[in-house]
Amino acid sequence: MWKAALVFCYLLALGWPLWAQEDVTDAAITPQDCSMDCIRQGGPGCEYCRITQADVKGALGFKPINRFGSCIPWPCFDLLGEDPELCQHYVQAPNDVKVEFVQEANPKSDTIVVSWKPSHYGIAFLRGFQVSLQALGGSTNACQLFLFHRNLSLPASHAHKVYKSDPFPGLSLGSQYAVTVMALPVPEEWKSFYHSKIFSTRSCAEKNGLEQCKKDWYPKQIKVEQEGTAVTVTFNLAPPNLGIRSYFSLCYANGMKKYTDITPNSPKNKTHHSFQLEDLQEGTNYTCEIAANEVDAVRRTFNVQVLHIKKGGTSPLSVTPSLALLIPVCLAVVAMLIVCLAALTRRKPKLHMKKLNIKPDVITQDEESGTQGEVVALPGKRPSPPRLLMCYSSNDGPAHIRAVMQLGAFIQQHMATQVCMDLWDSLGVAGEGSMAWYCRQIQQSDFILVVCSQGLNIKSKSPKLEDETDDTEADTWLDLRPNNFSSDVAVQLVGEEVGQAKARGQDLFKYMSVIFEHSTETDIPTELRLVSHYTLTRDLPLLFSHLHNVALHRPGGYLKISNISEEGFKKLPAGAALQQAIHEAGAEMRSKKRHPVEVEEETQKRQLILAETSAI
């Protein structure tokens, strides 16, 4: 029983200092005006005193440099008296340094007050604080010195007290500063006697409001109207008190930029102005910026979509009597030929269906009720086919890379698209560097397609060879994957581009993601789920529709292209090769899950096949 009572008393003794600390209030302590005699003699009312330049000059006989304020190298030794033991103890750096903004009338500058808490290590020997403020990249702006009187000895409970500095006025808006709070005394052999904090002053808009700031102002109201190939943009003008007289607009798309100077001079409308963007290409989405013609002015982004203009038809031809007689005859002949061809083509499927025991009435009923196909022309007159950059993961083995290459070959051959891949431009990648090559392709491509797979969730690692003496296999592995790491990093770059475009409110039509049929949607990274994603080969028509901006379905018709239909693409050599490559990639992925050890041996056997495919 007495042991339990002893333990209880021991715990009670340990907890007593904590209870004592909780009783201390957190009221902030502000500096006082004190005389140097009061500080040295330790009189009442001198607990926390500000030291001015006049005090330093009176005590030492010289005035410190203005930019250092009242700070001097050894304030404790020089100002508190002749006792050397008073200033030889170690005091640790303050804690919880904070910067607070103070309201002031000057709209062009900011004022702050610094607060902190003393450390409980060496607090009994604490003699004061020295607070300095420095602009990043410049010299010290100001320094303030605060001292306790020489007879004061603070208890550990005062480590919860908050001490404050005097205001630091006249700080430039939108600038970075470093504030340092130093505990006194400062023995030469110690290092952890100060605490620094970097902060930024408020911007002009944060302090005064957007309508009072020249550099931070930007148009909030933008209206875009299209008339033919000319686009009219209307925006609100800056307030007259800012003195902004000119503006500019910058539009860019497909590597092209168009700069427009704007100088409003209309005496009628002083709140809004309209200007025209001319010579824009039809069927192109532009990203435009507008801002005041000032240094470092904030830019407002908006999008402009130039629609296709239907050109008027030619004047009707004059029909002569002979031509009027020939037209009905020609139409009749064409109608007879169409009927004959329809009868022949209709008879062959019926004979074939009789052999397969298929009831033709069911298909006939479906054909009569179905939507009729129509011929749809690709929109616009592109000077060149759309440019598509393909990115992929190199962590899924050679079968997956071969499937990606076959997909690129099929898209380029049968979907009227120019495909860019690092495996097809090894010389360019080696000349520019992989990252520079990818960055340039991302900027210049009309579309970016990311082939998603399980390997996107695997961090790239340098290939480690188990047998270092097998130089032949090592060289083969390195040659087969020359852009192993750059391709994975490129996928991350595309993800960042998508996130930034989404944050700026831009159109994400440029970006796409696809998975093969053996993959799942969980293989698509989170940031790429914001863009359109397709499953191949099932969604080949949807991919074609995205690349060429054509509708799959219209009133009374639908888009039908035999080369990219679900059954038609298999009849093409490139389509059959794509289907076989996807099947092998799926088989390799399933075998990895069942036999991960045997897969490595199978991978080495397929390295030569991948090398031949890369050469092609």
Image (tube, rainbow, N blue to C red):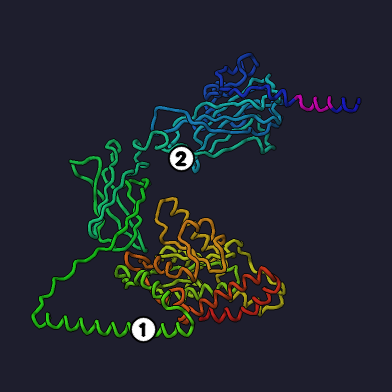
In this picture, is 73 found above or below 578?
above
Give residue 98's quadrant in the image. Answer: top right
Taking the magenta stretch, the answer to whether it contains residue 70 is no
Q: Looking at the image, is mark 1 or mark 2 nearer the viewer?
A: 1
**Residue 88 in sight here:** no
Left or right? Give the position of 61 relative to 296.
right
| Circle 2: element type | loop
Write the residue at 62% across / 70% down.
Answer: 589
Write the residue at 34% across / 35% down.
Answer: 212
| Circle 1: element type | helix
Dot 2 amino acid type: Ser
**Residue matched to label 1:** 345
Q: Give the range drawn in magenta.
A: 8-16
Labels 1 & 2 near each other (Cβ < 8 A): no
Taking the magenta stretch, the answer to whether it contains residue 12 is yes
In this picture, is 194 found above or below 428?
above
Label 1: few (<14), some (14–19) or many (≥20) C-alpha neighbours in 10 Å: few
Q: Does the magenta stretch mainly form a helix, a strand or a loop?
A: helix
Left or right? Give the position of 561 relative to 146.
left
Residue 445 % position (x, y): 41, 66
**Residue matched to label 2:** 175
Q: Which of 435 and 186 is in front in this view?
A: 435
Left or right? Give the position of 353 relative to 48.
left
Residue 303 % position (x, y): 34, 54
Give residue 56's quadrant in the image. Answer: top right
**Residue 609 in sight here:** yes
Residue reaching furthest to the top: 44
* C-alpha separation, residue under disc 1 versus residue under disc 2: 79 Å
Dot 1 amino acid type: Thr
Label 2: few (<14), some (14–19) or many (≥20) C-alpha neighbours in 10 Å: some
Write the residue at 46% across / 76% down.
Answer: 567
